Structure formats: C-alpha cells, structure tokens
Amino acid sequence: MTITLNSSVTNNADWKTQFQFTDGETGDLIDFTGATIEVEVRDSDGCKKIEASTGNGKLAIISTGIFEMTIPASEMQGLCPANYQAGGVYSLNGETISLFTGTLSIVSGVARL
C-alpha cells in the first residue's frame, strides 16, 4: 500500500527532510540495508525536475527504516512556485516497491544570502 504525501517547501534554501517507513503488515521498521532508494519530483508535464537517490548521494540511509534527503538550494532555486508530482520507490532483492506518491508545493522564498 502506497502512502500519499503532500508537502510544501521554499525554493530559496536547501530541502532537507527525513523519511521513516514501517512494514504495513508487521509494523516493523523497513530495513533498507543494501537497497537503492529514489525520490523524484516532476512538473505537470511529467518532466523530471529533481532526482534524489542513494546512487547520487542526495539520499542517505540513516538507520533502520529511516533515510534522509538533501536537495541543495542551487537545485531548489530552479523550481518555479507551483505544484509538482512527487514519488519514492526502493529496490531490494530484485523487487521494486513504492514508498509514496503525492504533491509537492513549491513556495517562493524571499530572503536570499
């Protein structure tokens, strides 16, 4: 069962967030050891705007069931204020499993250094 996630962030700063997932059947935290995890953000035309993965270093497994995503401000600044589609999957032992789908609202940030 996929989780629906709706969130908002500004486009003038790093986007850093942690995700925690449990197994829907057992309630145990999911062991992501050895998994490939990917989170994508796409615009309304389906064009990929952000790709974060364990492979490109923007996602890091922190502990059992928890991973952290960091998107630098330089990438966030390329996103115009709008609603975007977001989703995450992980692959482990030959299976690809959906973690979440949802909407990401980008809000224009005003303060810049």
Image: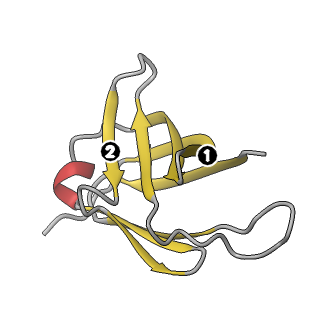
Q: Amino acid at mark 2?
A: Glu
Looking at the image, which is closer to me, 30 or 82? 30
Residue at 83 percent across and 72 percent down: it is 27
What is the number of the mark on residue 97?
1
Label 1 close to label 2 by CB (< 8 Å):
no
Looking at the image, which is closer to me, 41 or 82? 41
Residue at 51 percent across and 40 percent down: it is 86
Q: How is the image coloured?
A: secondary structure
Q: Which residue matches tag 2?
A: 51
Looking at the image, which is closer to me, 95 or 1? 95
What is the number of the mark on residue 111?
none
Query: Where, quadrant-wise, is the C terminus in this rendering?
Result: bottom left
Estimate the spatial distance between the alpha carbons at disc 1 and disc 2, rounded to whole Å. Answer: 17 Å
Which one is closest to the eye, mark 1 or mark 2?
1
* Secondary structure beneath label 1: strand
- Residue 74 screen position, x and y as percent: 16, 55
Q: Quadrant of residue 106?
A: top left
Residue 104 vertical placement versus 23 (above, below) = above
Q: Residues within 10 Å of mark 2 (few under 14, many from 20)?
A: some
